[in-house]
Image (spheres, rainbow, N blue to C red):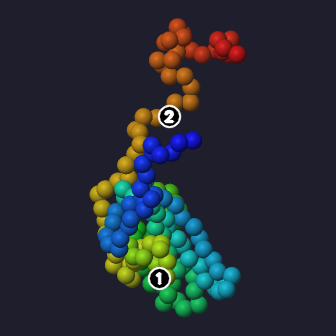
Amino acid sequence: MDLSNYKVEADTDGRVNLKPGRYVLHFQGEKVLTSEKNPSWEGYSAKFEVEDTAQTVDALFTTRHDNEKVVQNGLKSLLAMCKAMGLKELPSDTESAFMGKSVSAVIKQKEGSTFFEVDQDWGRTWEATNKKQKTVSEKPIEASPSAADLEKMGSTTLDDEDAPF
């Protein structure tokens, strides 16, 4: 195959190169994390898509630890994130409460890594934003033939007898 007609930039994979700074983040999912090395530790990790980049960053909040002050700092930052999302308190169902929500936060490069994370700054990073994640289409997905397809067939319903197989 002759590939000489194709042009490609070898220094990029099409992703935006993130730099530390403030971005709009769209909630994408969550995980509860534990540690085999420290069984008394537990964390809540929220995954966000960085607006207009198709890249994700995580925010990790300590929810269980031997030192209660560490837990309180984690929960205070989590509450600040909730308030930036328009919630008044920590929700009982985080995934449904956060889905479709966006916040503004500072991201930083993880120490010794090429990956980024939210720079929580003891909860001070979280700010409200009026930006929402872009939707691909507002039209509902049709699971059956469309009205136009039925019209082409000369019918308003689809019966098993009309199936072409």
User: Residue 69: x percent and y percent?
Assistant: 48, 90
Question: For numbered disc 1, what is the local secondary structure?
Answer: loop
**In which quadrant of the rendered image does the N terminus lie?**
top right
| Residue type at the position of mark 2 | Ile
**10 Å neighbourhood of mark 2: few (<14), some, or many (≥20)?**
few
Splitting the image into 4 quarters, where does residue 80 fall? bottom left
Viewed as shown, does residue 65 lie left or right of 113? Answer: right
From what the image shows, is residue 70 above or below residue 63?
below
Instruction: Spot the residue most to the left.
Output: 130
- What numbered label is drawn on residue 63? none
Asked if marks 1 and 2 touch (Cβ < 8 Å), the reply is no
Nearer-N-terminus badge (1/2): 1
Residue 149 appears in the picture as rendered: yes
Point out the frontmost of discs 1 and 2. 1
Q: Residue at x 49, y 82 (%)?
A: 112
**Quadrant for the C terminus in the image:** top right
Picture mark count: 2
Against 165, residue 79 (above or below) is: below
Q: Residue 129 is drawn in which quadrant? A: bottom left
| Residue at horizontal 52 percent and vertical 89 percent from the top | 68
> What is the distance, in whole Å, between disc 1 and disc 2 at their CAs?
43 Å
Q: Which corner quadrant of the image does residue 39 belong to? A: bottom right
Q: As rendered, which of 94 and 123 lies closer to the eye?
A: 123
Instruction: Decide: few, some or many residues near mark 1? Use Cα within 10 Å; few <14, some 14-19, many ≥20.
Output: few
Q: Residue 86 appears at what percent x and percent y? A: 35, 63
Q: Position of residue 103 (x, y in %)?
A: 36, 64
Q: Which mark is residue 141?
A: 2
Residue drawn at the location 57% of the way across and 86% of the way down: 65
Q: Which residue is mark 1?
A: 111
Q: Secondary structure at mark 2?
A: loop
Give 108 or 128, whichever is nearer the viewer.
Answer: 108
